[in-house]
């Protein structure tokens, strides 16, 4: 009986390599999961979760298919990736309104997992309006704002919408955000009613009305308004009178300036006049100051 028992024991030990296939070095790769796409302007990102964390030196590759394609093609920027996301912005899309199909798999040497298919999507419907580039110029009581449209210069995502964007701006004094105010502005605009020599901060976002879409805010930009601009008064003011027609003349150093004159009769017997000019220079606030007192 002992000999029989020993034979049985020996047969179990000898059979151990057969019941443990992992000991032979085989690898069982699991498919990625939760594939998803994030699109901001013309920036396309594919993300997924890995089910092969316990396996070393695993890479991932993706393929795509669009209408008119019979076979799957390798997705540019997404071949043999060691992380769990890739940028496929370089893929040549002629139409952002057509459906795209994507699939991903894990790889290790000659071993591959089953394909994981991402839910088909239409790029334009998936895309989000990204942060804007903003350029600021300061005046004493105003800030000139220049906004670059969303996307790149050759953007295909917003090519049909550049003229449809609205821009919403939030501005505040750097010393206190309690005085925030929001304005709708154009891509080139001017923010008035500001204080001289003050630091203002602002952020801007783009919006589309149809289809309704609100973009991400730009980074916060800050700028100091300049010191108060003192507009010089007109000089060499004179009045020419002929046949009861009075012509007011003066000299002024700046161009792009408008004027408005006022007068009053101070004494009917001596015909004394007080003259005041109001003038607007280079888009700045209207100023008013007396310039001279004279009699014709």
Image: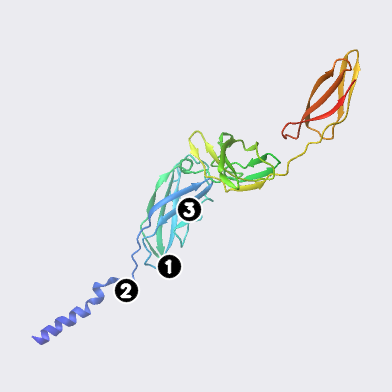
**Relative to 225, is 248 on the left or the right?**
right
Which residue has dot 3 on it? 75
Inter-mark Cα distance, 1 to 2: 18 Å
Secondary element at image label 3: loop
Q: Point out which mark residue 24 bears.
A: 2
**Relative to 110, is 202 on the left or the right?**
right
**Relative to 142, is 95 on the left or the right?**
left
Secondary element at image label 2: helix
Residue lying furthest left in this view?
1
Which residue has dot 1 on it? 57
Picture quarter with the C terminus: top right
**Relative to 115, is 131 on the left or the right?**
right
Inter-mark Cα distance, 2 to 3: 34 Å
- Residue 34: image location, x then y, percent: 38, 53
Inter-mark Cα distance, 1 to 3: 21 Å
Q: Quadrant of residue 200?
A: top right
Total labels: the figure holds 3
- Residue 228: image location, x then y, percent: 73, 41
């Amino acid at each position: 009986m002992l000999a029989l028992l020993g034979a049985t024991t020996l047969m179990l030990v000898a059979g151990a390599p057969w019941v443990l296939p992992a000991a032979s070095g085989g690898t069982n790769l699991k498919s990625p999961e939760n594939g998803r796409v994030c699109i901001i302007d013309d920036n396309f990102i594919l993300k997924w979760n890995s089910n092969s964390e316990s396996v070393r030196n695993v890479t991932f590759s993706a393929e795509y298919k669009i209408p008119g394609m019979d076979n799957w093609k390798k997705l540019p920027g997404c071949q043999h990736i060691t992380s769990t996301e890739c940028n496929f912005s370089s893929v040549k899309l002629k139409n952002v309104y057509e459906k795209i199909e994507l699939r991903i798999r894990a790889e290790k040497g000659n071993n591959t997992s089953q394909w994981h298919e991402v839910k088909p999507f239409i790029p334009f419907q998936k895309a989000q309006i990204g942060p804007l580039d903003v350029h600021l110029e300061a005046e004493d009581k105003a800030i000139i704002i220049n906004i670059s449209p969303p996307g790149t210069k050759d953007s295909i995502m917003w090519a049909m919408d550049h003229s449809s964007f609205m821009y919403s701006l939030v501005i505040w004094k750097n010393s206190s955000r309690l005085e925030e105010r929001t304005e709708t502005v154009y891509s080139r605009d001017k923010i008035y009613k500001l204080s001289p020599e003050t630091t203002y901060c602002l952020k801007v976002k783009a919006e589309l009305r149809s289809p309704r879409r609100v973009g991400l805010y730009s980074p916060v930009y800050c700028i100091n308004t300049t010191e108060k601009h003192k507009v010089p008064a007109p000089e060499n003011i004179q009045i020419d009178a002929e046949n009861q027609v009075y012509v007011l003349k003066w000299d002024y150093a700046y161009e792009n300036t408008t004027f408005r004159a006022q007068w009053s009769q101070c004494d009917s017997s001596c015909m004394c006049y007080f003259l005041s000019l109001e003038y607007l220079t280079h888009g700045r606030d209207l100023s008013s100051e007396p310039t001279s007192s004279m009699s014709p």
